Image (spheres, rainbow, N blue to C red):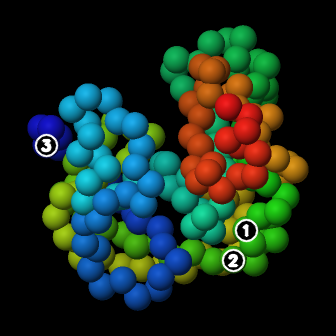
Amino acid sequence: MTEQPHAPGVRLFHFSDDPAIGRFEPRPVAVSSARPPGREWLNGPLVWAIDDWHQPLYLFPRDCPRILIWPTDATTPNDRVALWGERRARMIAYVERAWHARIRTGHIYRYELPAEAFEPLDDAGMQVSREAVDPLGVERFGDLRAALEAAGVEVHVLPSLAPLRPLFATTLHASGIRLRNSPGWQDSA
């Protein structure tokens, strides 16, 4: 992969439930994913970060299953009207009722990381470093629902995420995180 320059002022973050990380060491992902040919290395030892715009994807308790959607330039007018409507939010987050109290009462730590240590993946703001990285600072977020709403995210609480599987076949961007922790998700495949 060729290193791509970062836009001036880009900010990168890593979210954790650990308040005392002094150095991020590369490590393989906990659950390997099928990767396109030539990108299998993404399951190997890396430090992961997310850009500022996409950071609401991680304003959740670590293991919380969630789906976040938003329109892109590729979103069709039909999908925009049917699935997005006149919303002013920048994202919609869907979470399961079983997690809602933990979202309200939980907390997460946001570490800012030096952008020059990372290479962009061109995938929903994700960036990786193959080397160890020292954080620039850490900030605690409590009442994660309030933090999401302050970031322009409309939160919807549902009994199950399984009925939302068709969102991944639309022209909205759909990011599913920790879906393996959602009861019934595997059964809905």
Real-space CA distance between mark 2 and mark 1, rounded to the nearest whole angstrom: 5 Å
Judged left or right of residue 7, residue 103 is: right
Where is residue 14? Give x, y as percent. Answer: 41, 65
Q: Amino acid at mark 2?
A: Gly
Judged left or right of residue 35, residue 105 is: right
Q: Name the residue that disc number 3 marks.
A: 3
Q: Are marks 1 and 3 in contact (CB under 8 Å)?
A: no
**Residue toward you, 151 or 94:** 94
Real-space CA distance between mark 3 and mark 2, rounded to the nearest whole angstrom: 37 Å
Which quadrant does the N terminus fall into?
top left
Q: Amino acid at mark 1?
A: Ile
Q: Name the residue that disc number 1 marks.
A: 103
- Residue visible at 71% across and 43% down in the picture: 185
- Residue visible at 29% across and 46% down in the picture: 42
Q: Is residue 122 something that shows in the picture? A: yes
Density class for disc 2 (Cα within 10 Å; few <14, some 14-19, many ≥20) is some
Q: Are marks 2 and 1 in contact (CB under 8 Å)?
A: yes
Real-space CA distance between mark 1 and mark 3, rounded to the nearest whole angstrom: 36 Å
Q: Name the residue that disc number 2 marks.
A: 106
In terms of secondary structure, where does tag 1 sit?
A: helix
- Residue visible at 36% across and 79% down in the picture: 137
Where is residue 84? Give x, y as percent. Answer: 74, 28
Judged left or right of residue 36, residue 60 is: right
**Residue toward you, 177 or 144:** 177
Where is residue 179? Give x, y as percent. Answer: 63, 49
In terms of secondary structure, where does tag 2 sit?
A: loop
Density class for disc 1 (Cα within 10 Å; few <14, some 14-19, many ≥20) is many
Q: Amino acid at mark 3?
A: Glu
Work out whether 16 lies above or below 183: below
